[in-house]
Image: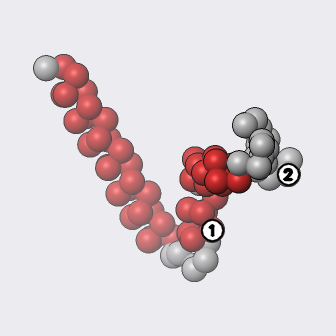
Amino acid sequence: MRHNKCEAGKGGLSVRVDRDNIEKALRVFKKKVMNDGILKDLKKSQFYEKPSEKKRRKNAEARRHHLKAEALKRKFAE
């Protein structure tokens, strides 16, 4: 398997299939799509989001991220 980094504005994702191993190539492709956040962006842009809702969502994400980081700090500090 060859993993190609996707540059901004240059094409899309690509996965090379070796020895007709389509299942493995599909798993790699799905993982790349998840890591790049393509599906998340598609779902997010499907409907209009009011600026106030967008701000509320971003604040909730930041809060969640901060709490998770604090929990990890406490876990490794023990």
Q: Nearer the viewer, residue 13 or 29?
A: 29
Residue visible at 26% across and 31% down in the picture = 72
Residue plotted at (39% across, 54% down): 61
As drawn, 40 above or below 33: below
Q: Choose top left, top right, bottom left or bottom right for residue 33.
A: bottom right
In the displayed structure, 40 sits above or below 77; it is below
Return the x and y of residue 20 as percentages of the image width and height.
77, 49
Image quadrant where one finds the N terminus: top right
Alpha carbons under labels 2 and 1: distance apart: 17 Å
Toward the front, the furthest residue is 19
Question: Are the residues tagged 2 and 1 within 8 Å (C-beta)?
Answer: no
Give residue 50's mark.
none
Helix or strand or loop: what does disc 2 sit on? Answer: loop
Question: Seen from this angle, which residue lies furthest right?
Answer: 10
Residue 11 seen in render: yes
Residue 40 shown left or right of residue 8 in the figure? left
| Quarter of the image that includes the C terminus | top left
Q: Going by the image, does 35 lie left or right of 25?
A: left
Q: Which residue in the protein does label 1 denote?
A: 42
Residue at 64%, 53% (x, y): give it.
23
Residue occupying image coordinates x 48% and y 66%: 54
On the image, the x and y values in percent for residue 65 come to 36, 44
Residue 32: in sight, yes or no?
Answer: no
Judging depth in this view, the residue of 61 and 1 nearest the camera is 1
Residue at disc 1, secondary structure: helix
Around disc 2, counting alpha carbons within 10 Å, would you say few (fewer than 14), some (14 to 19), or many (20 or more)?
A: few
* Residue type at tag 2: Gly
Label 1, residues with CA under 10 Å away: few <14, some 14-19, many ≥20: few
Which residue is tagged 2?
A: 11
Mark 2 / mark 1, whichever is N-terminal? 2
| Amino acid on which the number 1 mark rests in the picture | Leu
The answer to which quarter of the image holds residue 4 is: top right
